[in-house]
Image (cartoon, rainbow, N blue to C red):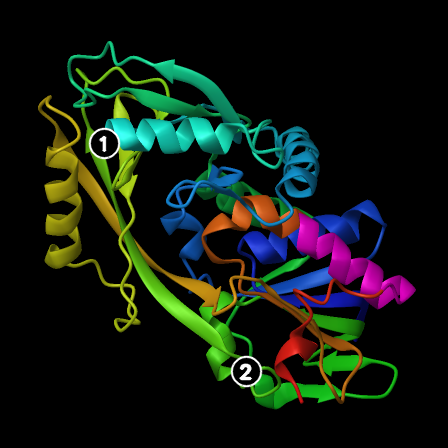
């Protein structure tokens, strides 16, 4: 029987964030993951402290960003790969009215450190932006595909990764320990994304699913060194490639790519850029979201050694480290969770 401090189910952004919290405190753990969840890919890895549709700050934006910057720097050092690409987000203005809305928002105390008050004129002939852009500060892209790949390889080197589907029927929860197959642990944390809907312990929580699809285009003439936000995001990748996304589908729960999503994204892209491009890839994933736009964090009402970390939504690269630390301190030290993320808000 292998004895560890924690069993972690799932190795997406939530699972990695919690594993890093465990590693920072010298806690032993093993991860069970079947690689079935792809929401981290669909998010394109953006970190952006502003909701650009409404010009409002993201919940706990300053705290999240400060923690995330250190988190990904540490991961780069651990894994020996480049993950964090510092890129400005340029919000394309569709009218003079939008320019004015931006300038008004940039004067607000909650946004002044995130929104530049300067109007940026468009000097790229391949971008259709006659009203220019507003620049969002402290933004960028995390290469989530590289992160997931290399983190799992790292876990294998320390014998902490098991590539298998978690079988709930084999889980035995005792008063002071958890047993699963040949592993005994003090705690189990479920960070399984959309897979939570089949979890008999937490499946009754109100997790919504939003399927998203993202295209990768190759556009050598675009020559864009910032993230462009309009009706879609256009995110620079390597080798003249750009991610374009993402769609939202609230009924389709498959990971299959669709022609409808491709058509929707290309229609929006056609109004945004003028240069020729080639579609070289398309991916789909299911985002775990919650109706109040806050994560699902906490412990089971009956089993205090069974916990959940889920519902990170579209901003997982920002919020993951923040909520992982909250859960760890709650389990280890009894610190209270922020009521806005505590699952008890949905329990009578």
- Reply above or below: 284 against 249: above
| Residue 42 counted in the magenta span | no
N-terminal of the pair, mark 2 or mark 1, is 1
Q: Nearer the viewer, residue 307 or 56?
A: 56
Chain part drawn in magenta: 322-335
Q: As drawn, which residue projects farthest toward the top?
A: 123
* SS at badge 1: loop
Q: Nearer the viewer, residue 300 or 206?
A: 206
* SS at badge 2: loop
Q: Which mark is residue 199?
A: 2
Q: Residues within 10 Å of mark 2 (few under 14, many from 20)?
A: some
Q: As drawn, which residue projects farthest toward the right?
A: 333
Q: Mark 2 to mark 1: distance in Å?
A: 44 Å
- Reply above or below: 79 against 182: above
Q: Nearer the viewer, mark 2 or mark 1?
A: 1
Q: Nearer the viewer, residue 34 or 241?
A: 241
Disc 1 target residue: 94
Image mark count: 2
């Amino acid at each position: 029987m292998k004895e560890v401090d924690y069993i972690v189910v799932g190795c997406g952004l939530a699972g990695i964030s919690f594993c890093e919290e465990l590693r920072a405190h010298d806690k032993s753990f093993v991860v069970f993951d079947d690689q079935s969840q792809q929401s981290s890919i669909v998010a394109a890895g953006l970190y952006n402290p502003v909701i650009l549709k409404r010009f409002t700050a993201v919940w706990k934006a300053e705290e999240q960003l400060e923690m995330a910057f250190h988190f990904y720097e540490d991961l780069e050092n651990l894994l020996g790969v480049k993950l964090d690409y510092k890129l400005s987000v340029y919000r394309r203005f569709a009218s003079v009215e939008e320019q004015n809305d931006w300038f008004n928002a940039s004067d607000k105390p909650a946004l002044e450190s995130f929104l530049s008050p300067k109007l940026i004129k468009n000097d790229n002939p391949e971008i259709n932006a006659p009203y220019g852009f507003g620049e969002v500060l402290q933004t960028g892209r995390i290469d989530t595909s590289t992160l997931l790949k290399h983190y799992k390889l790292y876990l294998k080197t320390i014998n902490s990764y098991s590539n298998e589907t978690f079988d709930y029927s084999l889980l035995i929860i005792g008063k002071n320990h958890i047993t699963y197959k040949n592993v005994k642990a003090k705690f189990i944390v479920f960070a399984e994304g959309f897979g939570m809907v089949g979890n008999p312990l937490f499946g009754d929580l109100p997790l919504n699913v939003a399927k998203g699809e993202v295209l990768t285009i190759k556009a050598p003439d675009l020559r864009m060194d910032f993230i462009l936000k309009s009706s879609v995001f256009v995110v620079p990748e390597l080798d003249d490639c750009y991610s374009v996304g993402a769609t939202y589908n609230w009924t389709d729960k498959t990971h299959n790519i669709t022609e409808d999503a491709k058509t929707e994204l290309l229609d929006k892209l056609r109004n945004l850029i003028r240069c020729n491009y080639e579609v070289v890839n398309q991916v789909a994933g299911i985002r775990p979201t919650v109706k109040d736009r806050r994560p699902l964090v906490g412990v089971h009402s009956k089993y205090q050694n069974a916990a959940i970390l889920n519902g990170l939504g579209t901003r997982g690269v920002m919020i993951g480290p923040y909520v992982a630390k909250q859960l760890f301190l709650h389990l280890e030290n009894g610190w209270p969770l922020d009521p806005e993320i505590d699952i008890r808000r949905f329990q009578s």
